[in-house]
Image (spheres, grey):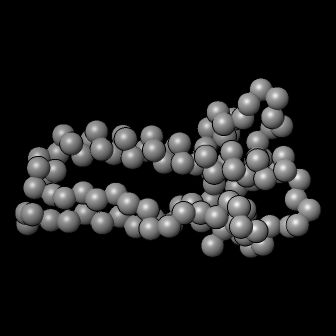
């Protein structure tokens, strides 16, 4: 019954980074090493002696996930706008927190 609220709660950034590899590669400069191919997001303390190239690859993988999420959200919004229920529904998209990527000695939740 109208009006209604739509709530979609996801935890995709903390579970799996499975965007196609090309999405990661978008964020690599020509002279950068290849981005990582990991699927399980890192979680826990960042090793003190981490290779900066490994850290860069993890950040590129995260950026690829965000790019894919952005495309998926765009496709959803295009479809949603054509649905008559969208005229009487508030749609709020937000992120409740970021994903730590090693800046403070920790990554993941």
Q: Quadrant of residue 88?
A: bottom left
Which one is in front, 51 or 16?
51
Which one is in front, 10 or 102?
102
Taking the image as shown, residue 26 lies to the left or right of residue 55, namely left
Question: Image height check: is 36 above or below 4?
Answer: above
Rendered residue at 64%/64% (across/down): 100
Taking the image as shown, residue 14 lies to the left or right of residue 106, namely left
Question: Can residue 52 be seen here?
Answer: yes
Q: Total number of numbered labels?
A: 0
Q: Quadrant of residue 13?
A: bottom right
Where does the image place residue 62, in percent across and percent down from the top left? 63, 51
Residue found at the very far right of the displayed protein:
49
Where does the image place residue 2, in percent across and percent down from the top left? 7, 63
Where does the image place residue 67, in percent across and percent down from the top left? 53, 42
Rendered residue at 76%/47% (across/down): 56
Residue found at the very far left of the displayed protein:
2
Question: Image height check: is 23 above or below 50?
Answer: above
The quadrant of the picture occupied by the N terminus is bottom left
Rendered residue at 83%/37% (across/down): 33
Taking the image as shown, residue 11 lies to the left or right of residue 4, namely right
Where does the image place residue 83, in percent across and percent down from the top left? 17, 45
């Amino acid at each position: 019954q109208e009006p209604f609220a739509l709530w979609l709660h996801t935890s995709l950034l903390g579970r799996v980074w499975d965007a196609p590899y090309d999405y990661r590669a978008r964020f690599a400069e020509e002279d950068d090493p290849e981005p990582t191919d990991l699927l399980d997001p890192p979680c826990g303390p960042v090793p003190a002696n981490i290779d900066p190239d490994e850290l860069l690859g993890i950040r590129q993988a995260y950026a690829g996930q965000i790019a894919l999420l952005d495309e998926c959200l765009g496709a959803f919004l295009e479809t949603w706008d054509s649905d008559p229920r969208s005229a009487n529904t508030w749609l709020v998209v937000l992120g409740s927190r970021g994903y730590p990527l090693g800046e403070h000695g920790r990554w993941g939740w």
